[in-house]
Image (cartoon, grey):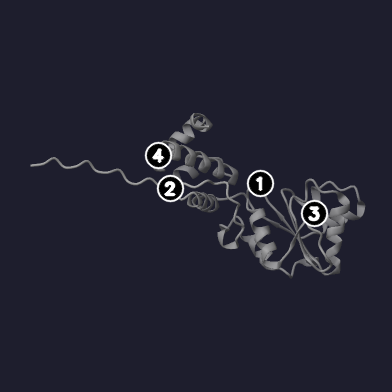
Amino acid sequence: MTASSPKAPPPLQLRLALDRPPSYARADFVASTSNAAAVSAIDAWPRWPGGRLVLVGPEGSGKTHLARAWAGKVGAVIAPHEVPERRQAVLLEDADRAIDDATLFHLINMADTGATLMLTARTEPSVWPARLADLRSRLNALMVARIEAPDDVVLTGVMRKLFRESNIKPGDEVLAYLIKRIERSIPAVRDVVRRIDALADAEGREVTRTLARQILECGDKTLDLFE
């Protein structure tokens, strides 16, 4: 009787870097009740009141994804890097930061001549700083669509997408374990996926709940050995 041969370990997954350009395809956007109202408002284009819409939400809530998907669909220019023409759709991100009053006032006024304007911001237009009295009244009149903080559906969907982009397919129990224990934000999801991918690749391990627990317990100290 011959001894059985040891069982060969499963082949390691080929892992890819996460530094690829982000996809803003609408099909990749994770929809849930936390962003349903914003999605509905965007899809009402071009019937926005006055041709203007402000998309408001916290960092990492999906504002850029939705806005860029809309811009690609309608052929909008991205201000202030591109100069819009009359009656053209325009997207201006972070409108509550790093934009001067004159530029913002000009873009808002363009909608009066048939252009369409989408603005994104983290805060409501009513609290944006504005030294021009005419701009203040314009900001107060803008239609606002709000994206709420991401819920479990969004966090899980984004985490699954990021793992898939790195050719990793963890079980649902791993995703559920992580979602319950990390900060409830998209940046936190990106960070934990980055750290898990780096450790799993460095040690040639599968992405399991045990590895996920190690990452959460050790934090960024886990990566110091490989950087």
Q: Residue at x 86, y 48 (%)?
A: 130
Mark in front: 1 vs 4: 4
Q: Quick one: 206 or 124, which is closer to the camera?
A: 206
Q: How far across and how far down the image is residue 218, in percent? A: 48, 30
Q: Please, is residue 194 above or below residue 29 in the view?
A: above
Q: Is residue 118 left or right of residue 148?
A: right
Label 4 is placed on what type of residue?
Gly
Q: Earlier in the sequence, mark 2 or mark 3?
A: 2
Label 1 is placed on what type of residue?
Glu
Identify the residue position indicated by label 1 in the image. Answer: 59
Mark in front: 2 vs 3: 2
Q: Earlier in the sequence, mark 2 or mark 4?
A: 2
In contact (CB < 8 Å): disc 2 and disc 1: no
SS state under label 2: loop
Identify the residue position indicated by label 2 in the image. Answer: 14
Identify the residue position indicated by label 4 in the image. Answer: 204
